[in-house]
Image: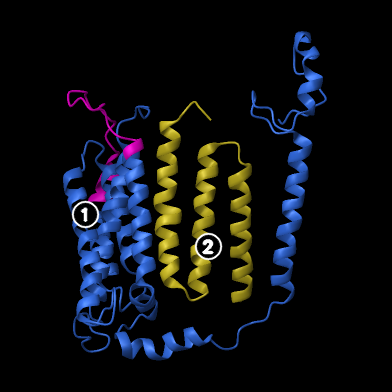
Amino acid sequence: MPRSGREPVCASARRYARPQRRATVFDARTGNVNPMLKRLFIFFTLILVAAIFSDVALNYSEHTELSRLAQHYASKGPEELGAANLVTSVVVTYRGLDTLGEVTVLFISAAGVGLMLRRRKHPDTVVPARKPASELVETAARLLMPMVFVFGVYVFANGHLTPGGGFQGGAIIASGVLLLLLAMPQAQLSHRLIGFTESLSGFSYVVVGVLGIVLAGGFLDNRILPLGSFGSLFSAGAIPIIYVFVGLKVGSELSAVVDRFRSDESKPEL
Amino acid sequence: MIEILMILLCAGILISGILAVRLESMVGAVVSAGLASLFAAVTYVILAAPDVAMTEASIGSGLSTVIFLYAIRKTRGED
């Protein structure tokens, strides 16, 4: 329950110190902000937000046609880049640099998790014995895991044809790894393998991007490979290759994050 | 028909979001945050954005829920 400034906190000894404390805006000792001021601040922020969004809500009108940029993507995208899934050609090629940035953000957060939740140095500390998973979970995982992995690979390998792509496929693969870790609590992920996959695919992604500068129109241009016949698996130039790398990278990063959060019950060392 | 479904889904997002903030139990709050993501994913499918829906369903309601649960277990006893 939030304590209002009026009621005495507890002991009478504190009462003499109280009046000057109540007047302060920010109490460094307890870290409390003056409640009145806090409420005022929240009130004004709400008014500001309401002012911004009322404009959006009152002048709302449905778009009946695409903007010029979107028009260009929609009409020229398929013939320029040869990808059946237009979203993919925007994400990987027209806005490829953004995707590279997103992958980098994910890499940094995975690295941060790895740093904060690192394991103990001593190799002789025993891994605490975990309760084995129930038979239901184990059997279901054994049945589902191959399907989950194959589906993840399907999603990122077909990113240029069907909805989905590197991020989604990678997340599906990571949830397959999660299922594996839940079903077999004693299993240890090979961090060397994960690190190797992660860095290799990140490196290859950038290499493919740089090849675009050399062989085609610019960074991450997908036309370094022939566009192929529209709608087939090997088409759309370098988009499937890029998506395979993104999928592997995202999958290994998210698996590493999940594994770090799971690994030994103890609290993180500080 | 589709409008009613949309209204129900949006109400679901709102209710589970409010629950995620208000619930006393940490696990319940995490689960209802995941539920909000799941409702959002279904709305994306209806709004013809299957790519976003896949991301939302797998990351928003799948992995992040589990990571939150692991984090709660790691910090158990301290709020």
Q: Position of residue A218 (x, y in %)?
A: 29, 78
- Horizontal relation, residue A114 to residue B15: left or right: left
Tell me the residue that label 1 is attached to.
A199
Q: Is residue A117 magenta?
A: yes
Q: Colour of chain A?
A: blue
Q: Which residues are magenta?
A: A115-142
Tell me the residue that label 2 is attached to.
B40
Q: Is residue A106 magenta?
A: no
Residue A136 appears in the rendering: no
The one nearer the camera, A188 or A59, is A59
Q: Secondary structure at mark 2?
A: helix
Which residue: 54% across, 55% down? B36
Up the image or down, A120 lies above or below B47; here it is above
The amino acid beneath tag 1 is Ser
Which residue: 20% across, 64% down? A204
The one nearer the camera, A218 or A255, is A218
Which quadrant is the N terminus of chain A positioned in?
top right
Q: What numbered label is drawn on residue B7?
A: none
Q: Colour of chain B?
A: yellow
Up the image or down, B44 lies above or below A251; here it is below
Which residue: 34% across, 29% down? A265
